[in-house]
Image: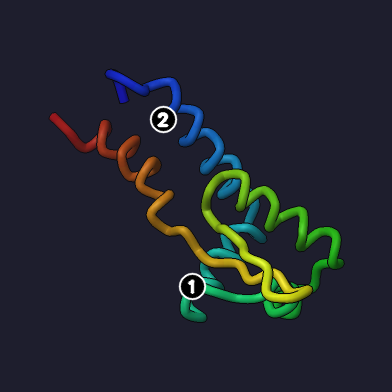
């Protein structure tokens, strides 16, 4: 990670790792991936036994970390997986596999 933008990349890594720290958020990401990468907030909430506020809080953390994005379709929010954001984790892990 050393070099230009290292602080920005480390902040991005921290946000992603913090988002991945909770098992429910990891499950949301996996569910979205397995269901084509896009789901409505209601579809996501329906897959879990969390209260609605808990689900929206998890989605907000994932969105703040850049792992999902949403767009409005009428009154519905459609969330889209942004798996490319996981590259910051791959980059960090790469430091340990290099000689």
Tell whether label 1 touches label 2 (CB within 8 Å): no
Residue at label 2?
9
The image's mark for residue 46 is none
Residue 52 position (above or below residue 12): below
- Please state the total of marks drawn on the protein image: 2
Q: Is residue 14 left or right of residue 87?
A: right
- Seen as rendered, the residue at the extreme left is 99
Where's residue 31, x and y in %? 56, 73
Quadrant housing residue 68? bottom right
Q: Residue at x 53, y 48 (%)?
A: 66
**SS class, disc 2:** helix
Q: Counting residues from the N terminus, which is met first, the one under dot 2 or under dot 1? A: 2
Q: Quadrant of the N terminus?
A: top left
**SS class, disc 1:** loop
Residue 65 position (above or below residue 69): above
Quadrant housing residue 3? top left
Label 2: how many residues lie within 10 Å, few (<14), some (14-19) or many (20+)? some
Residue at label 1?
37
- Seen as rendered, the residue at the extreme front is 74
Where's residue 22, x and y in %? 64, 51
Q: Residue at x 71, y 55 (%)?
A: 58
Label 1: how many residues lie within 10 Å, few (<14), some (14-19) or many (20+)? some
Q: CA distance from mark 2 to mark 1?
A: 24 Å
């Amino acid at each position: 990670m050393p070099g230009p933008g290292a602080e920005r990349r480390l902040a991005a890594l921290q946000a992603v790792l913090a988002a991945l720290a909770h098992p429910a958020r990891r499950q949301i990401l996996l569910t979205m991936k397995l269901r084509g990468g896009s789901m409505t907030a209601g579809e996501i909430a329906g897959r879990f036994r969390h209260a609605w506020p808990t689900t929206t809080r998890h989605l907000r953390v994932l969105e703040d970390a850049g792992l999902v994005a949403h767009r409005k379709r009428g009154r519905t929010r459609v969330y889209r997986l942004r798996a490319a954001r996981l590259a910051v984790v791959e980059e960090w892990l790469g430091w340990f596999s290099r000689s």
